[in-house]
Amino acid sequence: MSHPLVDRLISELGYAEVSLHNHDEFVAVPGMNVLFFPGDPATVRDSTDVAVVLPEIVETFAGQLRPGVVTDVFGDGKELNRHYGFREYPALVFVRSGEYVGAITRIQDWNVYLEKVSELLSSQPRRPPGFSIPVVSA
């Protein structure tokens, strides 16, 4: 399921639509690639807010961010979520030249975006967090 504000990123602004089929090629491009995982706009309240804010972030960091949108929420999106290990939607996942750098989830205050994106642009790649399973002893 999609939403006009998410669709606009691809149809009007020319952001790449990213799927399992083209993911590796998309994130391998030199520079900072940003994957937008909106989740299902029908159930993820902040997805349309981030869809509005993302172009502002891209414009503010002109020439430093290459955005893509993961629109297949229940198929490819789930698989890619497992790869990057974020726990909350919507998510902006930052990948520099094929290597994971970090993620920003949910809607944030503008100053938080400015600070976190600036940090991520100068951060070293690291391993995606992945999912952890709590261990409970009986």
Image (cartoon, grey):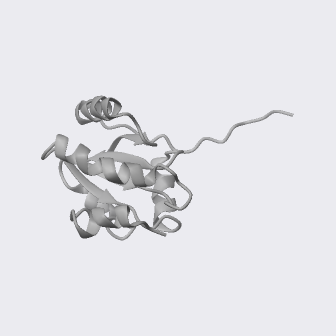
Q: Nearer the viewer, residue 111 or 84?
A: 111
Q: Position of residue 43 (x, y in %)?
A: 56, 58
Q: Position of residue 55 (x, y in %)?
A: 25, 51
Q: Residue at x 37, y 47 (%)?
A: 92
Q: Is residue 63 left or right of residue 71?
A: left
Q: Is residue 35 left or right of residue 89?
A: left
Q: Position of residue 64 (x, y in %)?
A: 16, 44
- Residue 89 position (above or below residue 134): below
> Residue placed farthest to the left in the image?
63
Quarter residue 7 falls in: bottom left
Q: Residue at x 31, y 37 (%)?
A: 125
User: How many numbered discs, if any?
Assistant: 0
Q: Residue at x 25, y 43 (%)?
A: 57
- Residue 24 position (above or below residue 32): below
Quarter residue 115 falls in: top left
- Residue 7 position (above or below residue 135): below
Q: Is residue 32 visible?
A: no
Q: Position of residue 47 (x, y in %)?
A: 44, 53
- Residue 127 position (above or below residue 26): above
Please state, as top left, top right, bottom left or bottom right, where the C terminus lies in the image: top right
Q: Is residue 100 visible?
A: yes
Q: Nearer the viewer, residue 18 or 42?
A: 42
Q: Residue at x 45, y 49 (%)?
A: 84
> Residue placed farthest to the right in the image?
138
